[in-house]
Image (cartoon, grey):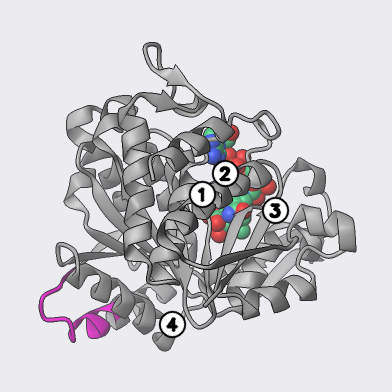
Amino acid sequence: MSKAIVVIPGDGIGEEITAAAVAVLRRADHKHSLGLVFETHQAGGAALDLYGLPLPERTVAAARQADAILLGAVGGPKWDAVQPELRPEKAILGLRKALGLYANLRPIRVPASLSEYSPLKPEIVSDIDILIVRELTGGIYFGDHCEATVIDGVEKAWDIEVYSVPEVSRIVALACQAATLRRGRVVSVDKANVLASSRLWRRTAEQAAEKYAGVTLSHMYVDNCAMQLALAPKNFDVIVTSNLFGDILSDEAAVLGGSIGMMPSASLGEGPGLYEPIHGSAPDIAGKGIANPVGAILSAAMLLRHSLTAETAAVSIERAVDKVLADGYRTADLYRPGLTEVSTEDMARLIERNI
Ligand code: NAD
Ligand code: IPM
Ligand code: MN
């Protein structure tokens, strides 16, 4: 039976890294007979230029029908001045919401071959295995917004953070479930010393975690968490947090592995899973063939694991990535003298060869 994969390259390096991930998926398909069928659709600035909308209905319709979605990245300076509703970033937010993808899994692992290349000391980052579970369809991203408005002669704008008990309950339950298959420790990250929404989050997290006997839940304020991630990252197993805090902490945690270009993600929920690296469209390096495709390729592995239950194929991609890195091949972001610098395409080809 065939499996429909909707590919949304998006903008900037999105095209280069999704091409690399699709090449690797085709190789995995060849080896493991997965029956993958690819269909490309537009979203973000690319769709805005073509259709006048960042998220055309035809892209949403195709995504709904798909078995899984692979996305590159959206956005870029070309569209920074468009009206807020038409921003490329709206495409990603709209897709997540339309498909009910409330759980964003962002695994942070540092392959042994990369621990020396982290800006932190190798003994601090070696063997790190953190799973950030980011709530993805609520919080300040989806509360009431008011663009700049003049009130009493003063210009103001606001965004409101709202969380409901069911929204917090389901994401914390998912984090606890994930922890049962890991080291059983969940840190819920909030700002409950200041924010009402965080106090509801904390109390709901306590209740949701009660059902998971083997899981230890603890709480941490987000400012301290930002520090602990750099100071003692090995202490973390699963982190569960809100949409905004998860966005920020995951970019910070990505540094542990030396480059944000390495980090994958899976967005899961009601509709088909959506898989994308955690980085953006990297306009500063777009079109140069030097972007690190590993985050996109590991996202493709997550796609096989979570949406296609093709665990063996997923592991074969992850092992191939480890092997190529251990052999000393690096894209520019992780290159150091003595290693071999390769392009985006070459990195994909090397990984393909090792599957
Ligand atoms: P970014 O993640 O695009 O880039 C930050 C830095 O990391 C840049 O120096 C970039 O060159 C580098 N980088 C990112 N991915 C890399 C890769 N694969 N290989 C090597 N280096 C890489 O973040 P930004 O510059 O803040 O945002 C640029 C645009 O992307 C903005 O329009 C933003 O809204 C958008 N964005 C989109 C997504 C998404 O589509 N999921 C995520 C984040 C940002
Ligand atoms: C991410 C991005 C998005 C987010 C933007 C582009 C809407 O930063 O996927 O991490 O903030 O969720
Ligand atoms: Mn982000």
Report if the beta carbon of the residue with label 3 is closer than 8 angstroms to ligand 1. Answer: yes
SS under mark 1? helix
Using the numbered discs, state the Cα–Cα distance from disc 1 to disc 4 in whole angstroms. Answer: 28 Å
Please tell me which of labels 1 and 4 falls first in the chain.
Answer: 4
**Amino acid type for the residue under numbered disc 2:** Ala
Residue designated by label 2: 20
Q: Residue at x 43, y 82 (%)?
A: 167
Residue designated by label 1: 296
Give the quadrant of residue 20.
Answer: top right
Span colored in magenta: 205-217
Residue designated by label 4: 167
Report if the beta carbon of the residue with label 1 is closer than 8 angstroms to ligand 1. Answer: yes
SS under mark 4? helix
Question: What x and y, as percent, mark residue 317?
Answer: 38, 50
User: Is the C-beta separation of discs 3 and 2 under 8 Å?
Assistant: no
Considering depth in this image, is 297 or 134 the residue closer to the camera? 297
Residue designated by label 3: 10
Give the quadrant of residue 76.
Answer: top right
User: Is the C-beta separation of discs 4 and 2 under 8 Å?
Assistant: no
**Amino acid type for the residue under numbered disc 4:** Glu
Determine if residue 245 is in view. Answer: no
Give the quadrant of residue 256.
Answer: top left
Task: Please tell me whether residue 210 belongs to the stretch shown in magenta.
Answer: yes
Please tell me which of labels 2 and 1 falls first in the chain.
Answer: 2
Q: Are there few (<14), some (14-19), or many (20+) residues within 10 Å of tag 2?
A: many
Q: Nearer the viewer, mark 4 or mark 3?
A: 3
Report if the beta carbon of the residue with label 2 is closer than 8 angstroms to ligand 1. Answer: no
